[in-house]
Amino acid sequence: MLECRAAQEAVAAGALDGGEARIGALDCLAQHIMGCCCGEPTDADALYEEVISTAPYANLPRAQFDRALDLVATGGYALRDRYTRIVQERTTGLWRARNASVAQQHRMNVGAIVEAQLLDVRLAHRAGARPRPGTPKNEPRPLIAGRRLGQIEEYFIEGLAPGDSFLFAGEVLRLVAVEGKDALVVRAMGEQNPSVPSYAGGKFPLSTFLAERVRELLHDPKKQKALPGQVRDWIKMQKRRSIVPKPDEMLVETFPRAQKHYLVCYPFEGRLAHQTLGMLLSRRLERAGMNPLGFLASEYAVAVWGLEPMGGLDSGALFDEDMLGDDLESWLAESTLMKATFAKCAVIAGMIERNRPGAERKTGRQVSFSTDLIYDVLKQYEPDHILMQAAFADAGEGYLDLRRLGALLARIKGRIIHRDLDHVSPFAAPVMLEVGRVPIQGAAEEAILEDAARLIDEAMH
Amino acid sequence: MALLSRPAPLARSARPARAMPPVAIAGDGVAVKLGDALVTALPEGALWIESAKTLIVSDLHLEKGSSFALRGQMLPPYDTFAALKKLEALMARLEPDIVVSLGDSFHDGGGVARMGAEDRALLQAMIGRCDWIWVEGNHDGRAPEVLGGVVRDVLHLGSLVLRHEPKAGAAPGEIAGHLHPCAKVSGRGRSVRRRCFATDGARLVMPAFGTFTGGLNVCHDAFAPLFPEGVLALVLGKARVLPAPWERLLSD
């Protein structure tokens, strides 16, 4: 709502966003090369001329083009392999697909948008009254997938545990299990507090420019008169429960919720800078032994959550400018963000196939498991592989805004207000509903395993 | 703010924990009594039998990368080297008399021929250092024989029986692979999915040792006939093996 209002004002003032031109990505280039070679025998020199005649690739050096060509042909590894997807005709020197099946596989995997994976939501019911012979008496009868209610993004279901309820298709449903591409649910009428799904597909990053206007709006009571009553109430509630910071201050709130401890700050610097801040913050918290589990960045806030209460932290030290000196790159290399970006690049460049002729589509979970393994191997043995470079470039463009972040840290120095609350604040509420949670594969994962192991230990003694 | 809070998760009472084999922490590994033999699960995913100085690994799936490359998916060609290096480091530390590769040592029958010269030399040097036994798998059969070592269909080691595919109803003391067990452990609103050993004290299924090998959740139906009383997962943590009881395991 605030963002809409800010956008309205911006339109009235005639201030429009300019989209920044993107530099052509290497994974898309690789797909284009493969596509050309599948179509007809292709001359590498002519293709290079054609590619650099387009604006995004105008500055592409020939060496990079050749590396992309090599990526298509052999996988582009330093260790030479004998296997190829495209071959050079001996007489003409033209490149073409090695055989028809390679070309078919390529056509089945064309596309530069790796969409969120969807699961079918199905009503489940128990199988017939008599259990299969041999199953123990108390074993629950197997679930049968029934009517399909619709589709939901996989990441949302991933965040639920069996037994959790959520709103879907106008009903309250309880998740029973996920089997293959189906999320099995039962009706759960009367269930209190179901989760509300949000859709990553509907996530459209607002510009940093707009976020700035929101910040002004929030700080200026005069401007707030134009806001609807509910939003004004929301701001009033925030004043009562926590505090609405002055324009030059940054608010940090800490509170416990659902067995986890949250730290939310509100820099209003836009999603990109917040992503980076989230990464760096969680890394610091990891070092401070707070066992952060994940973070989330929205247009105006960053939330980090973990296993330990974070109220006692010195927020001045936490947001110190020396944060940027932290080894961002090595953190990024370990992050799930980077792995996800790599997976997209690998799919687009054709290293990993989404679809195979005759095979049923796999779910995202199965695919992401194997790309993680591939990423780890490549990071260890050939960290400067062209796809790793492509992934770093993508992640850098998509998730880092170091310039804005630096300006923010300088601006808020000595102006951080910390409120340690006993529950979630009105400002924090929308952040908690945001999509795009980034899990942290750090000590917290080991802590979960150790939790389980401790049960065994107790049972033994 | 009613919509923000989630209901407390239901207690998972459907699966009582009947399988609780005696386990003991042994360094970074976990020791399990299997029949009357004591075996130690190591965090690398290998099994160590101290009394027989025997090291067991399963489902190496060597040359899986090149198998995919043949079909046009250019996976990084470092998987074989990575798996062999991991095994070599274990051998250097434990100095085993016997090394058993419990089947599916290669991803397919042609894997041995596709192996790079450097990897091949490394593997053969390792084979030469001890008594090396290949147990036949469904992917590779007797193919690795040409590299040295001996091939067995089933291997008897004292009271233990080592075979690739676990047999439902086998006598206690069976060690097998084939299924690539993985455990999804829940806790604190999140879950962690890792490779694991699966055991009920009578038999044990080993995790896959290979670099690109995926995993099958131990809650999957394929494990049910093997472990009718439930299973204890010995999960491969970053630096040590962590036992996770049946009640804490989630299906995918």
Image (cartoon, coloured by chain):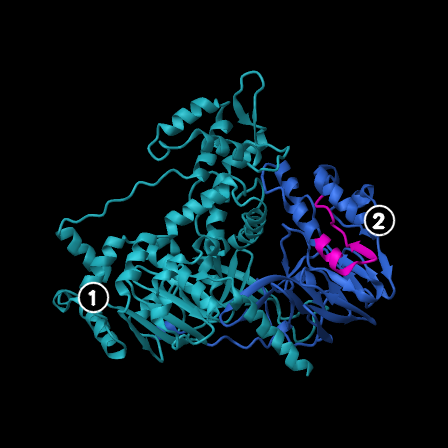
Please indicate, yes or no, whether residue A49 appears anywhere in the rendered image. yes
The spot of residue A317 in percent (x, y) is: 36, 69
> Going by the picture, which residue comes out furthest to the bottom?
A461
Q: Is residue B189 left or right of residue A133?
A: left
* Mark carried by residue B151: 2
Q: Looking at the rendering, which quadrant does residue B16 occupy?
A: bottom right
Q: Compared to B42, does A350 lie above or below?
A: above
Measured Cα–Cα span from mark 1 to mark 2: 75 Å
Q: Compared to B184, does B212 lie above or below?
A: above
Residue depicted at 45% across the width and 23% down the height: A45
Residue located beneath label 1 in the image:
A247
The spot of residue A219 in percent (x, y) is: 18, 67
Please tell me if label 1 and label 2 are on a single chain: no
Q: Amino acid at mark 1?
A: Pro
Please indicate, yes or no, whether residue A172 appears anywhere in the rendered image. no
Quadrant containing the C terminus of chain B is bottom right
Which segment did they paint magenta? Answer: B87-109
Residue depicted at 80% across the width and 57% down the height: B163
Q: Is residue A19 left or right of residue A285?
A: left
The spot of residue B46 in percent (x, y) is: 72, 60
Judging by colour alone, the chain drawn in blue in this rendered image is B
Q: Is residue B249 left or right of residue A242?
A: right
* Mark carried by residue B158: none
Toward the viewer: A79 or A423? A79
Write down the colour of chain A: cyan
Toward the viewer: A60 or A133? A60
